[in-house]
Amino acid sequence: MAEIILLSTSQKQELIDITDKVNSIIRKSEIKDGICNIFAAHSTGAIIINENFDPNICLDLLDALNRLIPSGIWRHDKVDGNADAHLKSAILGPSETLPIKNGKMDLGKWQSLIFCELDGPRVNRKIVVTMIGDKN
């Protein structure tokens, strides 16, 4: 079973908590126990699990990525100027797979599921949510 989330982003780089959106899809599926894969269908976006309670964590992550992978110095920049976004996305990864327990993602107390926009703003960022499990 699969569902699509479409997101529009408003900044060059931003982290968007999609935990509630994915849990809503799981509830609708009626799967009680299983696994859920969340996949960003873009080469300049990523899916991560991290804390989102303190917004500084998200800002710190973007700051660290920007220090590690600066913009404007890569060969691909001659094509469309976004090589750093591709590199950051490749390092973070396009997907996460999580257990479903009692009809929702089994995340830790401080964990959130986050879409990382690395080359925005964009419309219709496509996130594919695929679930397998029991509907007990």
Image (tube, rainbow, N blue to C red):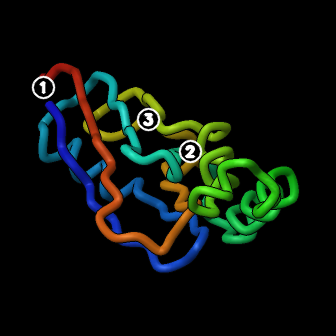
* Farthest-out residue, bottom: 10
Decide if residue 54 is on the left or right side of residue 1: right
Instruction: Look at mark 1 in the image and give the residue it sits on.
Output: 135
Which x, y percent locates residue 16?
Answer: 49, 64
Instruction: Look at mark 3 in the image and give the residue it sits on.
Output: 106
Q: Quadrant of the C terminus?
A: top left
Mark 2: which secondary structure?
strand
Report the amino acid beneath label 1: Lys
* Residue 101 found in image quarter: top left
Which x, y percent locates residue 47?
Answer: 50, 45
Of pointers 2 and 1, the one earlier in the residue sequence = 2
Of pointers 3 and 1, the one earlier in the residue sequence = 3
Which x, y percent locates residue 72?
Answer: 77, 63
Do tag 3 and tag 1 residues touch (Cβ < 8 Å)? no
Give the answer, above or below, for where 71 lies relative to 8.
Answer: above
Between the residue at mark 2 and the residue at mark 1, the CA separation in whole angstroms equals 27 Å
Give the answer, above or below, for where 55 lies relative to 130.
Answer: below
Mark 1: which secondary structure?
loop
Report the amino acid beneath label 2: Ile
Of 89 and 35, which appears nearest the observer?
89
Instruction: Look at mark 2 in the image and give the residue it sits on.
Output: 48
Residue beneath the point at 48% across and 55% down: 115
Of 86 and 115, which appears nearest the observer?
86
Q: How many marks?
A: 3
Of pointers 2 and 3, the one earlier in the residue sequence = 2
Residue beneath the point at 76% across and 62% down: 71
